[in-house]
Image (cartoon, helix red, strand yellow):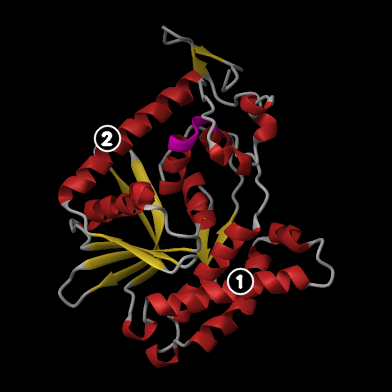
């Protein structure tokens, strides 16, 4: 799933179709409490509550990265390939889509021009596009698009649980067998995780399976993660108990987010991933100061609402 599009759906931006696929349209939004939960934002909170605050409440800008943008590009190419008849879904055709999808991506997100601003000869861009083509080509060794006819691509899903929690996200691909069995597929341009970290990787897929179950009353037969970076395919066949456990976990997570939103207490959780965070200048762990908290907060031990408290000590 293209995380930039998922982020847009989570934060209230519009995701519209324009000819060749979804384009994110940034909508101005004043600071407000979270209203829904996506797999990416749930993972953010579990990784670091303060990161969640910076992304969802403060909406601090983040610089585009080559790796994430390459993932977005590869997703777009694999989605568009299925526009062609089955016999025309070939490696040369897929690779030929890369330059055009890159042009379209830059048109919809002008900030991506920063990535190669210091590349006057275009050598780094050419290498980067070549890496995207390699990932696309590797996909053909993992799946056969001639034999696939997805029912949905880049499918936006949303449901509201009995508790009022709204879950939403975008699924890369949905396949339905003639017998009615559903397979949810997600492309990853990185490498497959080690076995001990597989459960974390499957969290996103179980999240989607929960939404599909709530919407369609059908438990997906298979969840499939396709890792183009390493050439691995990770599959999992969920049962109803899996989805019920995920729902309970999400409800507990949402309660923790609600409490942090009302108290203004968003504590950092240092990990090895901090080295890749764009927000070190605002993080107390790196000597930074979070921006003024933009929402009203409740005083500890009372129902009173105060203003201006910082989000992390």
37 left or right of 125? left
- Say above or below: 53 vs 241: above
Which residue is found at the position 51% from the left and 50% from the top?
7
Residue 49 forms part of the magenta stretch: yes
- Say above or below: 63 vs 300: below
Which residue is found at the position 54% from the left and 27% from the top?
268
Secondary structure under badge 2? loop
Which residue is found at the position 52% from the left and 51% from the top?
8
Query: What percent of the width, then of the height, locates residue 183?
Result: 27, 66
* Residue situated in front as seen by the camera: 22 or 291: 291
Query: What percent of the width, then of the height, locates residue 215?
Result: 25, 54
Question: Going by the picture, which residue comes out furthest to the bottom?
Answer: 87
User: Which residue is the site of mark 2?
Assistant: 163
Query: In which quarter of the view is residue 125 placed?
Result: bottom right
Answer few, some or many: residues within 10 Å of disc 2's Cα (few below 14, many 20 plus, some between 14 and 19): few
Query: What percent of the width, then of the height, locates residue 166?
Result: 35, 43
Q: Which mark is residue 293?
A: none
Which residue is found at the position 60% from the left and 77% from the top?
98
Query: What percent of the width, then of the height, locates residue 187?
Result: 43, 65
Q: Nearer the viewer, mark 2 or mark 1?
A: 1
Question: Which span is picked out in magenta?
Answer: 46-50
Q: How many numbered marks, from 0 up? A: 2
User: Which residue is the site of mark 1?
Assistant: 131
- On the question of residue 238 being in view, the answer is yes
Secondary structure under badge 1? helix
| Magenta stretch prevailing secondary structure | helix
């Amino acid at each position: 799933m293209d995380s930039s599009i998922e982020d847009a759906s989570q934060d209230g931006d519009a995701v519209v179709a324009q000819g060749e696929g979804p384009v994110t349209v940034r909508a101005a939004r004043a600071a407000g409490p979270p209203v829904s939960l996506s797999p990416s934002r749930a993972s953010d909170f579990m990784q670091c509550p303060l990161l969640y605050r910076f992304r969802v409440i403060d909406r601090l800008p983040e610089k585009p990265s080559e790796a994430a943008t390459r993932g977005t590009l590869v997703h777009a190419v694999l989605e568009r390939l299925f526009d062609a008849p089955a016999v025309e879904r070939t490696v040369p055709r897929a690779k030929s889509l890369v330059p055009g999808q890159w042009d379209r991506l830059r048109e919809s997100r002008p900030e991506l021009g920063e990535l190669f601003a210091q590349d006057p000869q275009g050598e780094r861009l050419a290498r980067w596009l070549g890496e995207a083509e390699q990932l696309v080509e590797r996909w053909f060794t993992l799946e056969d698009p001639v034999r696939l006819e997805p029912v949905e691509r880049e499918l936006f899903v949303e449901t509201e649980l009995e508790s009022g929690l709204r879950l939403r996200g975008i699924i890369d691909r949905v396949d339905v067998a003639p017998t009615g069995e559903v397979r949810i597929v997600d492309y990853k341009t990185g490498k497959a995780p080690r076995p001990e970290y597989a459960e974390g990787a499957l969290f996103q897929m179980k999240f989607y399976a929960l939404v599909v179950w709530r919407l369609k009353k059908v438990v997906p037969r298979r969840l499939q993660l396709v890792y183009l970076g390493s050439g691995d395919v990770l599959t999992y066949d969920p049962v109803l108990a899996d989805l019920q456990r995920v729902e309970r976990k999400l409800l507990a997570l949402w309660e923790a987010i609600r409490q942090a939103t009302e108290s203004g207490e968003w504590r950092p959780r240092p990990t090895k991933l901090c080295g890749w965070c764009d927000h070190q200048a605002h993080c107390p762990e790196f000597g930074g100061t979070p921006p003024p908290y933009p929402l009203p907060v409740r005083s500890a031990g009372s129902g009173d609402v105060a203003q201006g408290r910082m989000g992390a000590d």
